[in-house]
Image (cartoon, grey):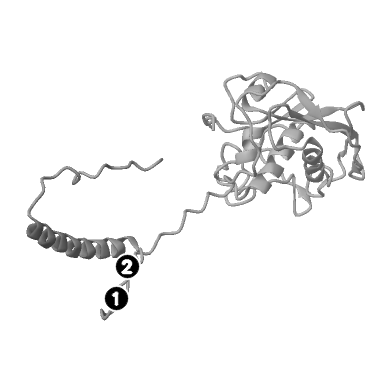
Amino acid sequence: MGGRGGRDRGLHRRRASRAGTVTLLALVVAVGLAAGGAYAARRGLPPTAPAAGARPTTAHPTPVPPRPVPAAGRVTPGISYPARGTGTFRTATALGAVAGNAGPLLRYRVAVEQGIGNVDVERFAREVAVILADPRGWTGGGRWRLQRVGRDDPADFTVLLTTPVTRGRLCADPTDHYTSCRNGDQVVVNVARWVHGVPHFPDLGAYRQYLLNHEVGHRLGQGHQLCPRAGGPAPVMLQQTLGLHGCTANPWPQVDGDLLTGPTGQYDDPVPADD
């Protein structure tokens, strides 16, 4: 907010006698210097330079409190987006290596909705590929292999980075602009969550790993799960976007070399309003 300027209210006064004026002026200057020094000390500003022969004084400025640190997972990386994008997509073109050593091979494309700013589709596709190829992920247990393919190659599913309103349309749930989803062969990543994460996740990078592994897990046939043990890591198929229910945040399907699972089911967590 801009500051508000004030007009000098002492401009239109009657003339006084010359002597009275000089005396009054000296008094005003003395009072003004004292008040100015007190104000400077209160505000932490350097005091007015002392007159010749006067003893210098030392100002004791009031400490300025540090700026608050943003909550974990709430720092944006410069991505901009409207609530509603164009509904058209830019698709990455590069062909990636096969991740995993055993199991059925599923191929996937990666695309970004037009209208999302500061996202290079090829770079985003590489981020997706790195997460899905991690040995702690779905390809680490020998049950599946995954490969990123280009725009014109056959694919088993597509990872889409979308605006919140487009997410609602593609997920057949127009009232939810907060979460992500998997609908058929579309893994829909809501850019609002990709940018902001959620308050209870330790950091944004880990949340992005969770988000992608969770939604791709649905494409691999996995359903929602509950927290198996309070204080232990959450299964990746727990809806960690909405709550942890006694578990600790965990972005990976594999924990200590084994697939971590919990009881089948989901909690009745409310979906937060739009960001």
**Residue 165 in the image: above or below residue 11:** above
Cα distance in 3D space between marks 2 and 1: 8 Å
x 62%, y 27%: residue = 164
x 61%, y 48%: residue = 229
Query: In this view of the protein, which residue sits in the foreground, 192 or 88?
Result: 88
Picture quarter with the N terminus? top left
Query: In this view of the protein, which residue sits in the foreground, 158 or 263?
Result: 158
x 70%, y 38%: residue = 118
Where is residue 255? Give x, y as percent: 73, 51
Query: In this view of the protein, which residue sits in the foreground, 260 or 40?
Result: 40
Where is residue 183? Give x, y as percent: 73, 23
Q: Which residue is mark 2?
A: 47
Left or right placement of residue 114 versus residue 178 in this view: right
- Identify which amino acid the numbered label 1 is placed on: Thr
Q: Which residue is mark 1?
A: 57
Label 1 CA crowd tier, 10 Å (few <14, some 14–19, many 20+): few
Tell me which corner region of the image, top left, top right, bottom left or bottom right, holds residue 245: top right
Mark toward the start of the polypeptide (2 vs 1): 2
Where is residue 275? Give x, y as percent: 54, 33
| Labelled pair 2, 1 in contact (Cβ < 8 Å) | yes
The total number of labels drawn is 2
Query: In this view of the protein, which residue sits in the foreground, 48 or 151?
Result: 48
Left or right placement of residue 208 versus residue 33 in this view: right
- Identify which amino acid the numbered label 2 is placed on: Pro
**Residue 258 in the image: above or below residue 163:** below
Where is residue 168? Give x, y as percent: 64, 22
**Residue 25 in the image: above or below residue 242:** below
Left or right placement of residue 226 versus residue 30 in this view: right
Left or right placement of residue 255 versus residue 92 in this view: left
Tell me which corner region of the image, top left, top right, bottom left or bottom right, holds residue 240: top right
